[in-house]
Every structure is written in C-alpha cells, then in structure tokens.
Image: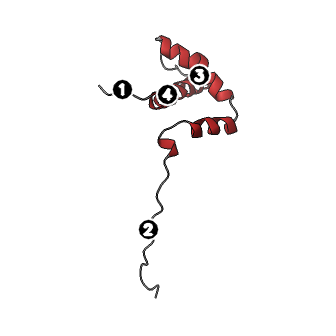
C-alpha cells in the first residue's frame, strides 16, 4: 500500500469536509435534509475545528498557506510553443 504524503492527505480531506459543510449549510438554508451527521472522530474534528477556522481566515492568509504547502496547486505550466499558422490572406 502506498503511503499518502501529509499534504495530499490534508488536501483531500480538506476538500471533502469543506464540501460536506457547504452541503449541510445549503440544506439547512433551504429546509432540506442534510447529509448524514459526522460519525468518526476524524469527521467531527474536521467539521468542528478545521472548517470553521478555514472559513474565518482572510483570503490573503489562505492563499499564503496554500502557496507554502507542496502540492499540485504549485505546478507551473510550460508556455505553449507558438508556431506560425501561415499567411492570413
């Protein structure tokens, strides 16, 4: 089994629990049934601590933290090679 690196684990879980919290918020706002309540300690920890803290961080601080963490969001794209297409006329 491949060991998942911490930044990848954190990103995957953060995305998941931010989505769950958003679904709960939208369901509550529209009077619909929400997703099932958190069951595990990890569920409760992310939904009780991580999501509220993350949502209160100003965007500039969030961006700085994301830039400091290794991961796919730091990849740079190679510029596309420009080839002349031929005469315009």
> Residue 88: percent from the left, percent from the top?
47, 84
Residue ID for mark 2: 81
Which mark is in front, 3 or 2?
A: 2
Estimate the spatial distance between the alpha carbons at disc 3 and disc 4, rounded to whole Å. 11 Å
Q: Say above or below: 17 vs 82.
A: above
In this rendering, the count of numbered labels is 4
Image-quadrant location for residue 31: top right
Between residue 64 and residue 36, name the one nearer to us: 64
Residue ID for mark 1: 3
Dot 4: what SS? helix
Estimate the spatial distance between the alpha carbons at disc 4 and disc 2, rounded to whole Å. 35 Å
Which mark is in front, 3 or 4?
A: 4
Image-quadrant location for residue 86: bottom left
Tell me which label, 3 or 4, sits earlier in the chain. Answer: 4
Q: Residues within 10 Å of mark 1 (few under 14, many from 20)?
A: few
Residue ID for mark 4: 10
Image-quadrant location for residue 68: top right
Between residue 66 and residue 46, name the one nearer to us: 66
The reply to whether the C-beta atoms of the residues labelled 3 and 1 are less than 8 Å apart is no
> Residue 82: percent from the left, percent from the top?
45, 71
Between residue 64 and residue 57, name the one nearer to us: 64
Q: Is residue 49 left or right of residue 40?
A: right
The reply to whether the C-beta atoms of the residues labelled 3 and 4 are less than 8 Å apart is no
Tell me which label, 3 or 2, sits earlier in the chain. Answer: 3
Residue ID for mark 3: 50
Q: Say above or below: 47 vs 60.
A: above
Tell me which label, 2 or 1, sits earlier in the chain. Answer: 1
Dot 2: what SS? loop
């Amino acid at each position: 089994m491949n060991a998942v690196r911490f930044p990848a684990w954190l990103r995957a879980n953060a995305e998941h629990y931010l989505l769950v919290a958003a679904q709960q918020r939208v369901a509550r706002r529209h009077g619909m049934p929400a997703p099932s309540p958190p069951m595990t300690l990890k569920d409760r920890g992310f939904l009780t601590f991580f999501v509220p803290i993350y949502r209160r961080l100003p965007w500039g601080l969030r961006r700085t933290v994301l830039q400091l963490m290794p991961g796919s969001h730091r990849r740079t794209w190679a510029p596309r090679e420009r080839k002349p297409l031929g005469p315009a006329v």
